[in-house]
Image (cartoon, grey):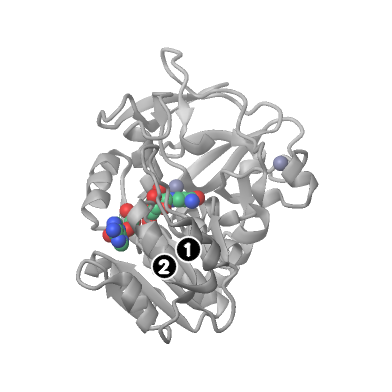
Amino acid sequence: MAQEVRGVIAPGKNEPVRIETIVVPDPGPGEAVVRVQACGVCHTDLHYKQGGISDDFPFLLGHEAAGVVESVGDGVTDVAPGDFVILNWRAVCGQCRACLRGRPWYCFNTHNAKQKMTLTDGTELSPALGIGAFAEKTLVAAGQCTKVDPAASPAVAGLLGCGVMAGIGAAINTGNVGRGDSVAVIGCGGVGGAAVAGSRLAGAARIIAVDIDDRKLATAKALGATHTVNSRETDAVEKIRELTGGFGADVVIEAVGRPETYQQAFYARDLAGTVVLVGVPTPEMKLELPLLDVFGRGGALKSSWYGDCLPSRDFPMLIDLYLQGRLDLEAFVTETIQLDEVEKAFERMHEGDVLRSVVVF
Ligand SMILES: NC(=O)c1ccc[n+]([C@@H]2O[C@H](COP(=O)([O-])OP(=O)(O)OC[C@H]3O[C@@H](n4cnc5c(N)ncnc54)[C@H](O)[C@@H]3O)[C@@H](O)[C@H]2O)c1
Ligand SMILES: [Zn+2]
Ligand SMILES: [Zn+2]
């Protein structure tokens, strides 16, 4: 029997979000229904609402979530009702060219639920990143459920489902930050803050946080930044070079998604260093760089989708480190809110007031 639950939809481009009754089908083969316990508000949800990702309105928003598996469809063996899970948007297929080459974190054919959730009038919903978790329950592919230690609170665990994993992974997976490295992180919101925390976890010796907002620099410091730079007041490239013996950082992580901050990242790295772009640009943005500098500075210019994470490997490991007190995930939860406060949370995000607002059910 399909169930009716409350969920937050984005009805149309730039229209305010609203709560609607969502019809959640019973799980079919390979699917699971999850009772959502917490779901963070990510910048990408705002991109969806603004029409910046696609025109497939109405969207069922929310994708940074943790909860308990309620029921599973035929053929599901990895998770069972009662399991505490983080939802992921990288349920790897095992069969695409990336998976077959042993690089499943690049999987090009990730799984989502085949059935559609709908409004009561039958209108099909597009769940954000194939998840749609600003809802009391959601239907996903079973592979989107990653079991973790239930000792972690849902509000904290859910954050690994997107932004915090993207930031930590940008540092430890894509940037390959290692012991003794110097790292600069440009843009220290939820994602950049997590890149700072990931760099500390990986043993970086010097972690330089750059932002235009002093509040973000203060949280970056708490998360492990050894130096902070307000780039509204100080030239970020010069300051990063000065703090690294005049050379630039080994790894520079761009967590804003703009051409000018990418250029700063490009010139703030040491020769043969690595730039990691984890911020998401918009379609009209263009980048101009002297090709000779691209060649002459050597090293690697990389992009990081979802922190190149493999949920089955990274989520349980990071939850364990959190439970051991080695990774402060609680620092990312600025406030917990109710389902009807998502629109307000977007405003607070826009004002820069929060790292993460998390809806708890
Ligand atoms: N690659 C991925 O898989 C992935 C996953 C999740 C989010 N993202 C993207 O990462 C980016 C950051 O997300 P977030 O949730 O941390 O957003 P956020 O709004 O919380 O943080 C952005 C930060 O950048 C700072 N900033 C803005 N302009 C700046 C500038 N010119 N110089 C320095 N700092 C500046 C802001 O003050 C803020 O602290 C977004 O583009 C988001 O879409 C990427
Ligand atoms: Zn694959
Ligand atoms: Zn996200």
Q: Position of residue 108 (x, y in %)?
A: 66, 39
Q: Which label's residue is closer to the chain start, 2 or 1? A: 2
2 or 1: mark nearer the eye: 1
Image position of 108 (left or right of 154): right
Nearer the observer, 227 or 118 = 227
Q: Residue at x 46, y 68 (%)?
A: 252
Q: Residues within 10 Å of mark 1 (few under 14, many from 20)?
A: few
Pointer 1 residue: 293
Tell me the amino acid under the disc marked 1: Asp
Q: Residue at x 80, y 45 (%)?
A: 100
Q: Which labelled disc corresponds to residue 267?
A: 2
Tell me the amino acid under the disc marked 2: Tyr
Q: Are marks 2 and 1 in contact (CB under 8 Å)?
A: yes
Q: Residue at x 48, y 53 (%)?
A: 158
Quarter where residue 230 is shown: bottom left
Secondary structure of residue under mark 1: helix
Mark 2 near ligand 1 (CB under 8 Å)? no
Residue that extends furthest to the front in the rendered view of this protein: 292
Q: Is residue 13 above or below residue 220?
A: above
Secondary structure of residue under mark 2: helix
Q: Position of residue 340 (x, y in %)?
A: 28, 38
Q: Residue at x 58, y 21 (%)?
A: 1
Q: Which labelled disc corresponds to residue 73?
A: none
Q: Quarter of the picture for ligand 1? A: bottom left
Q: Is residue 210 above or below residue 106?
A: below
